[in-house]
């Protein structure tokens, strides 16, 4: 007899949709706007054409991007993030910030007016207070 299926965590759900470096780098390349296939190949260093094709199809299946045809012969498309795909920008910025702190502190985002490194905080607008996400038992709950 087996027990109930474990409920995947929100992080597991996100990783199931975009859980590899190539997919995240493709999303990053699409954040400024629509791109054609060859443009993406140039913007994502090291990605092979077949991997890029597969990642674009996967993102389209997940409704994170749309392919808009611009030529019938040969068939060609420009790829553009959907609103849901653009929502990944915040997560990518957090990952990039985390990576910069470990790789090159000069790359940490800074406030344009004073040059101070910015900090990311969780905030509850209803309670008007910051939530300490680094405590042993963070006050964050996914419902």
Image: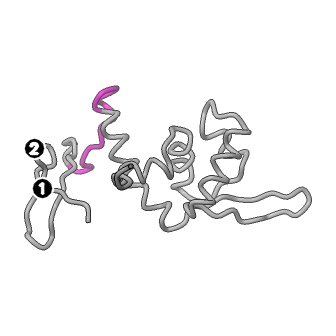
Figure label count: 2
Instruction: Name which quarter of the figure residue 50 lies in.
Output: top right
Q: Position of residue 27 (x, y in %)?
A: 53, 50
- In the picture as drawn, the residue positioned furthest to the right comes out as 73
Q: Residues within 10 Å of mark 1 (few under 14, many from 20)?
A: few
Instruction: Give the position of the C terminus as an image quadrant.
Output: bottom left
Q: Residues within 10 Å of mark 2 (few under 14, many from 20)?
A: few
Residue drawn at x 21%, y 41% as measured from the top left: 117
- In the picture as drawn, the residue positioned furthest to the top comes out as 103
Secondary structure beneath disc 1? loop
User: Magenta span covers which residues?
Assistant: 101-113
Residue drawn at x 85%, y 58% as measured from the top left: 75
The one of 11 and 8 positioned closer to us in this rendering = 8
**Residue position marked by numbered label 2 in the rendering:** 135
Residue drawn at x 53%, y 56% as measured from the top left: 32
Report how far apart the C-alphas of labels 1 and 2 lie in the structure.
Answer: 8 Å
Residue 108 part of the magenta-drawn span = yes
Residue 116 part of the magenta-drawn span = no
The one of 1 and 14 positioned closer to us in this rendering = 1
Instruction: Name which quarter of the figure residue 107 lies in.
Output: top left
**Residue position marked by numbered label 1 in the rendering:** 139
- Which labelled disc corresponds to residue 8? none
**Left or right for 47, reference 27:** right
- In the picture as drawn, the residue positioned furthest to the front comes out as 1
Callouts 1 and 2 close, C-beta under 8 Å: yes
Secondary structure beneath disc 2? loop
């Amino acid at each position: 007899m087996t027990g109930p299926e474990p409920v995947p965590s929100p992080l597991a759900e996100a990783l199931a949709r975009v859980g590899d470096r190539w997919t995240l780098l493709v999303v990053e390349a699409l954040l400024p706007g629509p791109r054609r296939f060859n443009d993406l190949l140039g913007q994502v260093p090291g990605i092979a054409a077949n991997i890029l094709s597969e990642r674009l199809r996967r993102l389209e299946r997940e409704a994170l991007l749309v392919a808009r045809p611009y030529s019938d012969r040969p068939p060609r498309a420009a790829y553009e993030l959907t609103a849901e795909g653009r929502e990944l920008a915040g997560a990518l910025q957090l990952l990039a910030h985390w990576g910069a702190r470990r790789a090159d502190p000069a790359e940490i985002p800074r406030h344009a007016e004073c040059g101070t490194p910015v900090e990311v905080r969780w905030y509850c607008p209803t309670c008007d207070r910051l939530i300490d996400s680094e405590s042993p038992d963070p006050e964050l709950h996914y419902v």
